[in-house]
Image (tube, rainbow, N blue to C red):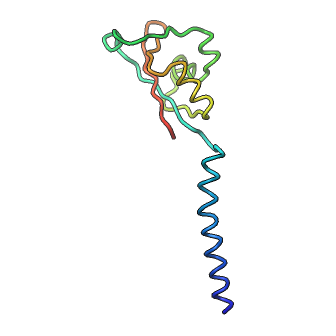
Amino acid sequence: MEKKRIFLIFICIIAALSVIIPIYGMFFQYGPYGAIYISELTINEVQDNDVIHLTEQDFHNFPALDSLIRQKRPGYIDLNQDQYDAYGNQFGGKVLEYEGKYYDLHFLIV
């Protein structure tokens, strides 16, 4: 009888955790929300696109761009949700230009 009771308590704990953990994940963001990376474009690929000419202020306000473009850091840069939204609102769907080179900024949700 004692083993059955322990087993039922164990099942109840597992059931409660299987409900609580996903709810916690929906309301409390932990870890990166998304990531960005860039690819360089040729002039032929940007003729009909909106182009943003990057300034020092852009690199100051969006330091991940500095890492990806000026420091030529390969790979992805993780962003929290606020950063991800800020980059998307400012640069989403646009081509970036810096020192005569053109870049496409890609957004991923992690």
Question: Where does the image place residue 58, in percent across and percent down from the top left?
Answer: 59, 13
Q: Could you tell me which residue is drawn at 66 percent across and 46 percent down?
A: 28
Residue at left 43%, top 17%? 103
Q: Nearer the viewer, residue 5 or 109?
A: 5
Judge by depth and name the residue closer to the eye, 55 or 88: 88
Q: Residue furthest bottom?
A: 1
Q: How many marks?
A: 0
Q: What residue sits 65% from the left and 52% below the top? A: 24
39 left or right of 89 in image: left
Percent coordinates x, y for residue 50 in the rendering: 42, 11
Residue 11 lies in quadrant = bottom right
Name the one closer to the observer, 41 or 82.
82
Q: Residue furthest left?
A: 44
Would you identify the image quadrant in which residue 48 lies?
top left
Where is the N terminus found, in terms of image quarters? bottom right
Residue pictured at 57% horizontal, 34% vertical: 78
Q: Judge whether 59 appears above or below 81 on screen.
A: above
Residue 98 drawn at (x, y percent) = 49, 10
Q: Nearer the viewer, residue 22 or 97?
A: 22
Residue 91 percent coordinates (x, y): 51, 19
The vertical placement of 27 against 57, above or below, is below
Give the answer, above or below, for where 70 lies relative to 82: above
Is 49 positioned to the left or the right of 32 in the image?
left
